[in-house]
Image (cartoon, grey):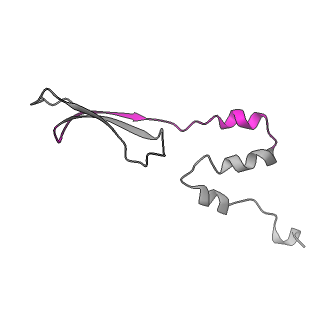
């Protein structure tokens, strides 16, 4: 999307629809002419943290806490669905 500009002093701004601590999810490079958006470039990122490499050197018990960090937006839900023994096995 290219729109003819009225000024020569364009401003380029990095924007995103997310909290600054959520790095890597979405980045918009926006070119502004005053308050008008002239051009934008969306950059979709991925939150690869090398979890597979971390898992190579750990047992499953040592690695389980890392699972909650995969999707930091749904940590509460991951904790809620932990694996438990059936009740009849607990007695």
- Looking at this view, is 52 or 89 the one in front? 52
Please give the name of the residue rendered at 81% of the width and 67% of the height, measured from the top-left corner.
86
Identify the residue at the far right of this view.
Answer: 91
Give the image location of residue 12, x and y in percent. Answer: 27, 32
Q: Is residue 73 left or right of residue 89?
A: left
Identify the residue at the far left of this view.
Answer: 6
Q: Is residue 42 magenta?
A: yes
Give the image location of residue 47, x and y in percent. Answer: 54, 39
Q: Does the magenta stretch include residue 64?
A: no
Please give the name of the residue rendered at 58% of the width and 49% of the height, measured from the top-left corner.
71
Identify the residue at the far top of this view.
Answer: 8
Which region shows up in magenta?
34-59
Give the mark count: 0
From what the image shows, is residue 75 above or below residue 9?
A: below
Q: Examine the image and state in which quarter residue 91 appears.
A: bottom right
Q: In this view, does 42 lie to the left or right of 84?
A: left
Give the image location of residue 28, x and y in percent. Answer: 34, 37
Give the image location of residue 85, x and y in percent. Answer: 82, 64
- Looking at this view, is 61 or 6 the one in front? 6
Please give the name of the residue rendered at 43% of the width and 49% of the height, measured from the top-left corner.
19
Q: Examine the image and state in which quarter residue 33 appears.
A: top left
Specify the quadrant that holds the N terminus: top left
């Amino acid at each position: 999307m290219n729109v003819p500009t009225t000024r020569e002093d364009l401003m380029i701004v990095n924007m995103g629809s997310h909290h600054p601590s959520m790095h890597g999810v979405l980045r918009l490079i926006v070119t502004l002419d005053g308050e008008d958006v002239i051009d934008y470039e969306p950059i979709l990122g991925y939150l690869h943290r090398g979890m597979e490499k971390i898992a190579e050197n750990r047992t499953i018990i040592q690695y389980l806490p890392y699972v909650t960090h995969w999707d930091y937006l749904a940590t509460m839900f991951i904790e809620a669905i932990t694996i438990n023994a059936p009740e009849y096995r607990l007695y």
